[in-house]
Image: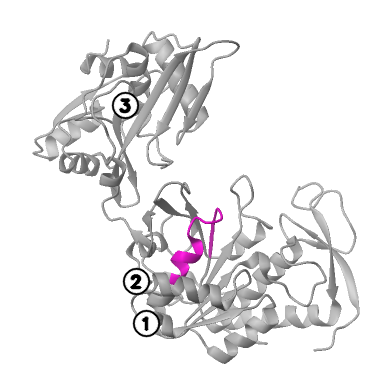
C-alpha cells in the first residue's frame, strides 16, 4: 500500500483526543498529556474508514448503512458462547470462559508466569476448538517450542501455530491465512504499525495497535489474548486508553521466590471482578489450586504471640488466612508503621481505635503487620484480626490456634457486620476452627439459621472482643 504524505497530529495520552497543534491542557482536563504523532494521511483515513465500517457491522448494521436507535426491551439478547480454557481457575476469573470476539489484557511482573499460563490455555483450546495463532515479539519459535514441550501434555500443541512477528500488518495477514479460534499477542509493547514512524512500545504505537486488534477481534469474532508489560510501580505500561478498549483486564501477581500465583480481574465486561484464581508454579507449568485455604494455612505454627486466623470472601469462596503482627520499641524519631497486604491508611485507623477505645498506647512502638501468603484482601473483614494480632504482640499473650476473628472496626470502636458470614463460618468449621469471634448482629443471625457446632462469640465492640479472648 502506498503511503500518503505524512502529517503531524498531537494526541492526548489520557483520553486519545487528537489536536492539529500542541495544547498545554486537554479538553479532558489533563495537563502536558499531548505527544506528537506522525501519520500517513491516506492510510490513516483508510484505517478510520475501515474501523467505522466494521463498527457498523458489529452493531448489527451493514457497512455504509445508518444504524437506528432501538428500544432496550426490543433488543434480542442471549447467552454469549464461551470457549472453555481447560483451566478451572482461569475460567473462574473470566466468568466462565473466553467470550468470542473479546479482547483480554493480562499483565504481570517479568517471570511471573504470563506466557506459561497462556501457552497452557492455548494447548487446551487448540485441542477442543481448533487452531490457535500465537504471535510473539519477544521470543523465537524455538524458544516457544521448548516451553511447550515442557508444559503441554495433552497433545493440543499440534494445533498451535507460532509466528515470531512484530508488524501488525503481517499479523493481520497471518490471521486471514490461519483463521484461528484464538489469537495471542505476546506482547503489545513489541508490536508496531507501518502507519506510524515511532518506535515499538511508544504511546502512539501501543494505542494504534490496540485499536487495530479491537477492530480485528470485533469484525472476525476471534477472541484475542494480549500480554502487556508493567511499570516499576506495577501499573500497566502504555496509554490508559488501551485498558478502556479491552473487555477484560487481568493481573497476575505473586512473589518470584514463592510458588503461589494469584490471578485477579480488575475489569470484566462479561463477569464479576471479585473472583480470584490461584495457581502453583511447578516444573511442568502452572497448576490450579482448589483448596486455597489449606495453602494459606499450611505453615500456620499454632498459638504464638501476634498471630491470629482471619477470613475473607473472594468471589464465590471463603478463604482462611493468617494475620501476623509485631510491635517493637521505637529507637529514634517517629514510630514506623509497616504493612504487607493491609493498606497503611486502614492500619493507621485501627491503631487509632486501639489507642482510644482499648487503652493501648502505641505511640513509641514500631508496628509491623503481614498477611501471610502474599494475598491482599480488598474488604474490611480482617480489621478485627489485625487489631487482635497487634494487641497480642504488644501484651505478649498468645491467641489459641483454633480461634478465628472476623469483623469490620468502626471509628467508634464498634464491630460492624460483614457479608457472607455464614459461608465463612462453614469454611472455618471444615478447617477445624472451634471458636469464631464476630460482630453481634452476624452471630445473632447465624444462631437462628444454622445448627453449627462452632462456638460463636458475638461482640459489640473491640473491647468486648479482647475480653472474650482474655487478652485484657
| Between 464 and 72, the one nearer to me in the picture | 464
Please report contact status of discs 3 and 2: CB closer than 8 Å, yes or no.
no
Residue 342 versus residue 133 in the image, above or below: above
Color theme of the render: one colour
Q: Which residues are magenta?
A: 105-119
Please report contact status of discs 1 and 2: CB closer than 8 Å, yes or no.
yes
The residue to which callout 2 is attached is: 86
Please report contact status of discs 1 and 3: CB closer than 8 Å, yes or no.
no
Which quarter of the picture shows residue 81?
bottom left
Label 1 to label 3, Cα distance in Å? Answer: 47 Å
Asked if residue 108 lies in the magenta stretch, the reply is yes
* Residue 430 shown left or right of residue 362 in the figure: left
Identify the secondary structure beneath mark 3: strand
* Residue 333 shown left or right of residue 114 in the figure: right
The residue to which callout 1 is attached is: 127
Label 1 or label 3, whichever comes before in sequence order: 1
Identify the secondary structure beneath mark 2: loop
Amino acid at each position: 500500500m502506498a503511503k500518503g504524505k505524512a502529517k503531524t497530529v498531537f494526541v492526548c495520552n489520557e483520553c486519545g483526543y487528537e489536536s492539529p497543534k500542541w495544547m498545554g491542557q486537554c479538553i479532558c482536563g489533563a495537563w502536558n498529556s499531548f505527544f506528537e504523532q506522525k501519520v500517513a494521511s491516506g492510510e490513516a483515513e483508510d484505517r478510520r474508514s475501515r474501523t467505522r465500517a466494521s463498527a457498523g457491522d458489529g452493531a448489527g448494521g451493514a457497512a455504509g448503512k445508518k444504524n437506528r436507535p432501538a428500544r432496550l426491551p426490543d433488543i434480542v439478547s442471549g447467552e454469549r458462547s464461551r470457549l472453555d480454557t481447560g483451566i478451572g481457575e482461569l475460567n473462574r476469573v473470566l466468568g466462565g470462559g473466553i467470550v468470542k470476539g473479546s479482547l483480554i489484557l493480562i499483565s504481570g511482573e517479568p517471570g511471573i508466569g504470563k506466557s506459561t499460563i497462556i501457552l497452557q490455555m492455548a494447548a487446551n483450546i487448540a485441542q477442543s476448538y481448533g487452531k490457535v495463532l500465537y504471535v510473539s515479539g519477544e521470543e523465537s519459535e524455538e524458544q516457544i517450542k521448548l516451553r511447550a514441550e515442557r508444559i503441554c501434555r495433552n497433545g493440543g500443541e499440534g494445533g498451535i501455530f507460532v509466528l515470531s512477528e512484530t508488524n501488525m500488518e503481517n499479523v493481520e495477514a497471518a490471521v486471514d491465512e490461519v483463521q484461528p479460534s484464538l489469537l495471542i499477542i505476546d506482547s503489545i509493547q513489541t508490536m508496531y504499525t507501518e502507519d506510524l514512524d515511532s518506535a515499538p512500545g511508544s504511546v502512539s504505537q501501543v494505542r494504534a495497535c490496540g485499536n487495530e486488534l479491537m477492530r480485528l477481534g470485533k469484525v472476525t469474532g476471534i477472541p484475542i489474548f494480549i500480554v502487556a508489560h508493567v511499570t516499576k510501580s506495577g501499573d500497566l505500561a502504555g496509554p490508559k486508553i488501551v485498558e478502556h478498549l479491552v473487555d477484560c483486564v487481568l493481573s497476575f501477581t505473586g512473589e518470584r521466590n514463592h510458588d503461589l500465583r494469584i490471578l485477579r480481574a480488575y475489569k470484566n465486561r462479561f463477569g464479576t471482578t471479585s473472583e480470584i484464581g490461584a495457581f502453583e508454579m511447578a516444573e511442568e507449568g502452572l497448576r490450579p489450586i482448589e483448596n486455597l485455604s489449606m495453602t494459606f494455612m499450611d505453615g500456620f505454627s499454632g498459638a504464638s504471640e501476634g498471630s491470629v486466623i482471619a477470613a475473607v470472601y473472594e468471589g464465590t469462596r471463603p478463604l482462611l488466612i493468617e494475620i501476623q503482627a509485631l510491635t517493637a520499641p521505637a529507637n529514634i524519631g517517629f514510630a514506623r508503621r509497616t504493612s504487607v497486604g493491609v493498606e497503611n491508611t486502614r492500619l493507621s485507623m485501627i491503631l487509632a481505635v486501639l489507642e482510644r477505645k482499648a487503652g493501648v498506647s502505641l505511640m513509641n512502638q514500631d508496628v509491623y503487620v503481614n498477611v501471610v501468603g502474599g494475598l491482599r484482601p480488598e474488604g474490611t473483614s480482617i480489621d478485627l484480626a489485625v487489631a487482635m494480632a497487634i494487641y497480642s504482640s504488644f501484651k505478649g499473650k498468645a491467641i489459641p490456634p483454633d480461634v478465628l476473628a472476623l469483623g469490620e472496626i468502626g471509628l467508634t470502636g464498634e464491630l460492624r457486620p460483614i457479608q457472607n458470614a455464614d459461608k465463612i463460618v462453614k469454611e472455618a468449621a471444615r478447617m477445624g476452627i472451634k471458636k469464631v469471634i464476630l460482630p453481634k448482629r452476624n452471630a445473632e443471625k447465624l444462631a437462628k439459621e444454622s445448627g453449627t457446632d462452632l462456638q460463636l462469640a458475638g461482640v459489640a465492640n473491640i473491647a468486648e472482643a479482647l475480653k472474650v479472648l482474655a487478652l485484657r
